[in-house]
Amino acid sequence: MENKLSDFKMLEEAPYEIPECRANIELIMKGLKQAEKVYGPVFTANFIKYALLFVARKYGEEPPEDIKTLDQFKEYIILVSDKYPLACYHVILYAQIKVENELEGSSGVVGTRMFHTGLAKSILDVSVIKERNVDLEAVILKLRQISIATKIGPQKIGYKINEDGSVLILNPNCYFLEGCRELFYENLLKRADGSIRCSISGSVMQYLKLATGYDWDYVVLEFDAPYCIAKCFMI
């Protein structure tokens, strides 16, 4: 394996095993509403449809028929997650990417960018310096502090800053993984260039963009190994 796990610095471990569902849902809703602005009402209708079908198939729950808005869906998926703690992450990731594939094709560029930008803006500390010589390690540590304080970050995550300024992200137990597996098996987890999508990396990428003032991209180097490793790099 090119990247040894021992090469990564592990960030502060969160004092919880699973991120808080409601805190994450509130944040994710902001991202979904940004995507809704791109696609219009069809995004919301199809997102809810695919999400409820996933809940029924995966957890055997019979969903109500009167869920029409993202806010109504939010309250419903929080109730489901009381019984199945990871459901909100799996369901939302699956439905979001499935509907983007349907509306925009395999790239999902516009909707995905709007989604992750909405997330990053919601958690970005505006005091983070924007300059070319930004201290990447300080930015990453700050992001970790914010993600733990808001109870949205994974319990464990590591990083490695390469000599070229790129950043490797190690996610040993991602709470989105089951949703990613479903999408992978349905051949829906691909980006336009054929590489694998990653919700965590997409948000980190947008955070780095907002923090540094420069564009970033990412590529997943290892998926479900069972950990995942992604590379974020300036473009």
Image (cartoon, rainbow, N blue to C red):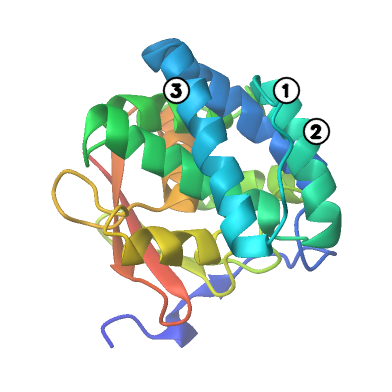
Q: CA distance from mark 3 to mark 2?
A: 18 Å
Would residue 226 be seen by someone viewing this image from the given angle? yes
Q: Residue at x 21, y 35 (%)?
A: 105
**Separation of residues labelled 3 and 1 (CA atoms):** 14 Å
| 32 w.r.t. 146: above or below | above
Mark number for residue 43? 3
Q: Position of residue 40 (x, y in %)?
A: 43, 11
Residue at position x 57%, y 59% in the image:
57
Q: Specify the quadrant of the image occupied by residue 164.
A: bottom left
| Residue most extreme to the left | 193
Q: Give the SS element for disc 2.
A: helix
- Residue on which the image places disc 2: 75
Q: Is label 3 in a helix, a strand or a loop?
A: helix
> Sequence-wise, which precedes: disc 3 or disc 1?
3
What residue lies at 38% left-to-right and 43% top-to-bottom? 98
Q: Are marks 2 and 1 in contact (CB under 8 Å)?
A: yes
**What's the amino acid at mark 2?**
Glu
Residue on which disc 1 sits = 71
Q: Are marks 3 and 1 in contact (CB under 8 Å)?
A: no
